[in-house]
Image: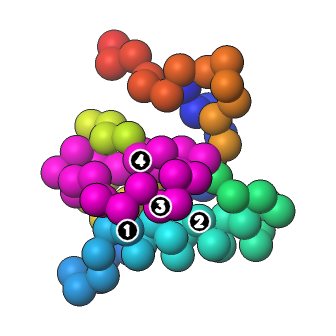
């Protein structure tokens, strides 16, 4: 599970989720020097049909607030789906 990441807020109703993720990822890269490889979204937000060039895995997580994205870098050893205790 991702333990450290960047929380991003975008409540624009006219911006598609894929665009929101791309904008957040660009900021993440500028701030931290690398692209994130995972983005958690609220399940009701849906999963964008574009795979974001296969670079960012989009995972629904019930703990994510509306209009928020949680981006970060998940190592190969870590599972992408957090346990739902």
Location of residue 42 in the rendering, given as x and y in whole percent from the top left corner: 28, 49
Q: Of helix, strand and loop, which one carries label 4?
A: strand
Location of residue 57 in the rendering, given as x and y in whole percent from the top left corner: 48, 45
| Label 2 close to label 1 by CB (< 8 Å) | no
Q: Residues within 10 Å of mark 2 (few under 14, many from 20)?
A: many
Q: Earlier in the sequence, mark 3 or mark 1?
A: 1
Which residue is label 2 attached to? 25
The quarter holding residue 27 reads: bottom right
Is 38 covered by the magenta stretch? yes
Q: Earlier in the sequence, mark 4 or mark 1?
A: 1
| Label 3 close to label 4 by CB (< 8 Å) | yes
Q: Quadrant of the C terminus?
A: top left
Q: Of helix, strand and loop, which one carries label 2?
A: helix
The quarter holding residue 48 reads: bottom left
| Label 2 close to label 3 by CB (< 8 Å) | yes
| Label 3 close to label 1 by CB (< 8 Å) | yes
Q: Residues within 10 Å of mark 1 (few under 14, many from 20)?
A: some
Q: Nearer the viewer, mark 3 or mark 1?
A: 3
Which residue is label 4 attached to? 58
Which residue is label 1 attached to? 18
Disc assigned to residue 52: 3
Relative to 51, is 31 above or below? below
Q: Earlier in the sequence, mark 3 or mark 4?
A: 3
């Amino acid at each position: 599970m991702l333990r450290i990441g960047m929380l991003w807020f975008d409540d624009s109703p006219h911006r598609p989720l894929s665009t929101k993720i791309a904008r957040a990822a660009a900021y993440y890269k500028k701030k931290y020097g690398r692209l994130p490889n995972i983005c958690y979204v609220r399940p009701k937000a849906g999963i964008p049909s574009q795979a974001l060039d296969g670079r960012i895995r989009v995972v629904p997580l019930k703990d994510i607030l509306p209009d928020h994205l949680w981006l970060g870098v998940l190592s190969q050893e870590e599972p992408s789906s957090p346990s739902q205790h």
